[in-house]
Structures are given as C-alpha cells and as structure tokens.
Image (cartoon, rainbow, N blue to C red):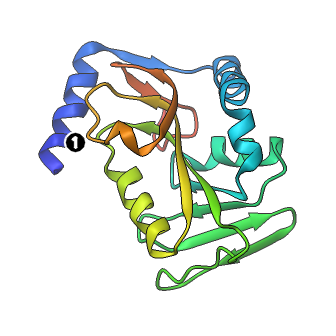
Amino acid sequence: MQNLSKNSRERSKSIGRMSYSPQQIFDLLNKFCYIYGEIIEIVDAICAIENGGVIPGRMIADIHNKPFYSLTKDNNVNASYGHKNWSTKNGKSIIPAKHKLIALFDDVIDTGKEMERARKKMEEMNKHYFMFTLIIKPWHQMNISKNIYFVESKQEWVKFPWEHGCS
C-alpha cells in the first residue's frame, strides 16, 4: 500500500499543485454546506480524521452546532465541544452511545487508506456513518457504493494552509 501512496503522490506532483487561498477554502466549505447541509443536520456528531480533516471538520461542526471528535493516526479519539475537551487512551471509544450516526470527515481522499481506517473504527464502535471529503482523487481505492460524499475531484497535488510544512 505504501507504493500506491507514493505513486499517487508522484502522479499528483507530475500533474501540478493546487494551493487553496483562505477565500477558496471558504468557498469550498460553503459549497460543501450547500450540497450536504441537510445530511449534516441529521448526523449526531462530526468525527474528523487527523491531521487534514480537523480544521475543516471543526468548522463544519461549529457551523451546524454538532459535537466534534477527531480520530488520531493511532486510533485514539479526541473530543471537543464548546469549552469541553476529552481524550482517550488505547483507542477506547468516548463517542457517547447517544451519537449513533457520525459524519466522518477528511480534507482529501487520495488512496482512501485513512478513510478506510476511520470507517473500520466506526464499525468497531457500532456507529453508523457517512463519509465526507472536500477533495477526492480519481485514483482512490475507496468503494464508491459506501456513501462517500465529496465536493470536488482533483488530480493536482492539493495543499491546504493547515498542512504541516506548507510554504
């Protein structure tokens, strides 16, 4: 799988880079809320995939007044809502039982590996979910029949301001 990820990065870089300005991000989030706002309204909470999904996921959670969680690379769940912040250790779920329908969120789906990991974590926690992303790559390995909702499909290497090492 690592070769697939490396090859997709190289394919994107050879096609070109696309950096998003704050206005473009605002427009992308606006478009997301316009297209998927009704679905977001029925979910119980937003769970973003760290690192890329956290900032836009939190923004969407705040816009729709939804509890917000983030899933770390080591499958721990962090939560924050209003002024409350919680963390878990050893991957123990702290998403309350009352939150049964979750919106999984990431900024970009490239190979789909991170979203697949998050999907499996939701299933382990007996959660129902929708999968959302701002940008999806045409070569992703996700099964489209699994309800992936996206705003744009891009071949370019996408850079958002919140990415580590952005210049």
Residue 153 visible in this rendered orientation of the protein: yes
User: Residue 78's image quarter?
Assistant: bottom right
Question: From what the image shows, is residue 79 above or below residue 17?
Answer: below
| Residue located beneath label 1 in the image | 5
Residue 6 image offset from top left, x and y in percent:
19, 39
Q: Nearer the viewer, residue 52 or 138?
A: 138
User: Residue visible at 28% across and 23% down?
Assistant: 12
User: Residue visible at 66% across and 32% down?
Assistant: 36
Q: From the viewer's perspective, is 33 left or right of 47?
A: right
Q: Nearer the viewer, residue 90 or 165?
A: 90
Residue 3 image offset from top left, x and y in percent:
12, 44
Q: From the viewer's perspective, is 15 left or right of 43?
A: left
Look at label 1 and name its amino acid: Ser
User: Residue visible at 16% across and 34% down?
Assistant: 7
Residue 115 image offset from top left, x and y in percent:
41, 51
Secondary structure beneath dot 1 equals helix
User: Which class describes the residues within 10 Å of circle 1: few (<14), some (14-19), or many (20+)?
Assistant: some
